[in-house]
Amino acid sequence: MPRPTIDDPHTLARTFALDPGQARAIFGAARAVVEADGPARDRGAHLLAVTSATLELGDDWRAHPAATPAGLAAAFPTPRARQHVIDALLIPACIETEVSAAGLARVRSFAAALGVRSHWLATLGALHRRRVFAVQRQLVRRSPDGRRVLARTWAEEGLLGVVRALLFVLGLHRDRALAGRFRALARLPAGSLGHQLVTEFTTRGLNFPGERGGMPERMLHHDLMHVINGYATDPAGECELAGFYAGFADGDAFTFFVIALATFHLELRVSPAIVTPARGAFDPARVLAGFLRGRRLQVDVMGPWDYWALMPLPIAAVRERLGIA
């Protein structure tokens, strides 16, 4: 996927209404972190090229110098903006598939200058030391998806819903009527969302919601978003989808970036056992495109939305309905 160009209406600069000084400061901070150990290597150079383009600074990222902590602080005076900037620096700190001591120190120096105390900064230290449990604990505490699934389950089904969720964890929950409804989607026309979803599940050997070992229906949005967006289910595609979720999710949406970086770029076992970690799968251009697409999403797909009504429609029509065509 090509990186954004300065003619692309969907860029970070325009999405967040950054002025040129702020764009240069963010890029400069990212460059300072990438080059904390010396000149940018291939992955770092690719990240900086993508960052320069989406901040509308042009194609020659080498023309823009690294920033100082004081310069970054001057560009972003508000606490909220400073928090977001420091969190975003986790990406360049991880880009070379490890968090170096120098990279960690550089991010900490920016955080100190901006007066930011971030839980993700503490997590960066755990990523540097490859302390899996510490990272997992933070992800469980911060996950917007996990929090919302539990809240919806309790609000809509009460204690019975919690029991069903426990049965799912144990692989024991069954709902034959629900499973049959999903299986019936195979009769929809080829190219429809429902038919493509069945094809995806069958090809990957997955059980449907309602079947033994199948996922709870409230978690189906993840697989639906793979199908609707056309994202692969390999590590690179999971990173792409993480960017998409980070673009629209309420709460601490940066969690999705950290999950993708830790699991599929640093190869840490911080996700459920069924997920196989990988190294080097976080492609900045693809993740950025997913994030910008997620910003355009018009439906809260992690909430109670009627995706059954979309099952007979072609994928292109579904994207239109969701605002992500």
Image (cartoon, rainbow, N blue to C red):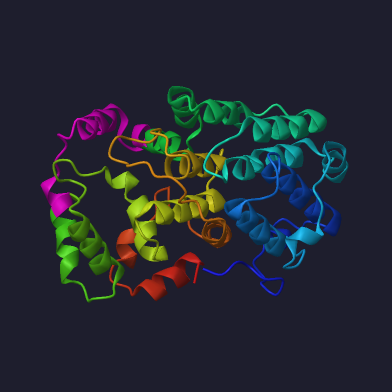
Visible in this render: residue 46?
Answer: yes
Residue 233, image quadrant: bottom left
Query: In the drawing, does residue 31 fall left or right of residue 73?
Result: left
The percent position of residue 27, horizontal first and vertical second, equals 75, 52
- Residue 79: image quadrant is top right
Residue found at x 67% / y 55%: 48
The residue range painted magenta reads: 153-179
Name the residue rendered at 22%, 55% in the picture.
204
Q: Residue at x 70, y 26 (%)?
A: 117
Depth check, front residue: 207 or 20: 20
Number of marks drawn: 0
The answer to whether residue 306 shows anywhere in this view is no
279 sits left or right of 53 in the view: left
Q: Is residue 176 above or below residue 156?
A: below
The residue at the point 66 percent across, 29 percent down is: 118
Vertical placement of residue 65 versus 82, above or below: below
| Secondary structure, magenta segment, majority class | helix
Q: Is residue 177 magenta?
A: yes
Q: Quadrant of residue 50?
A: bottom right
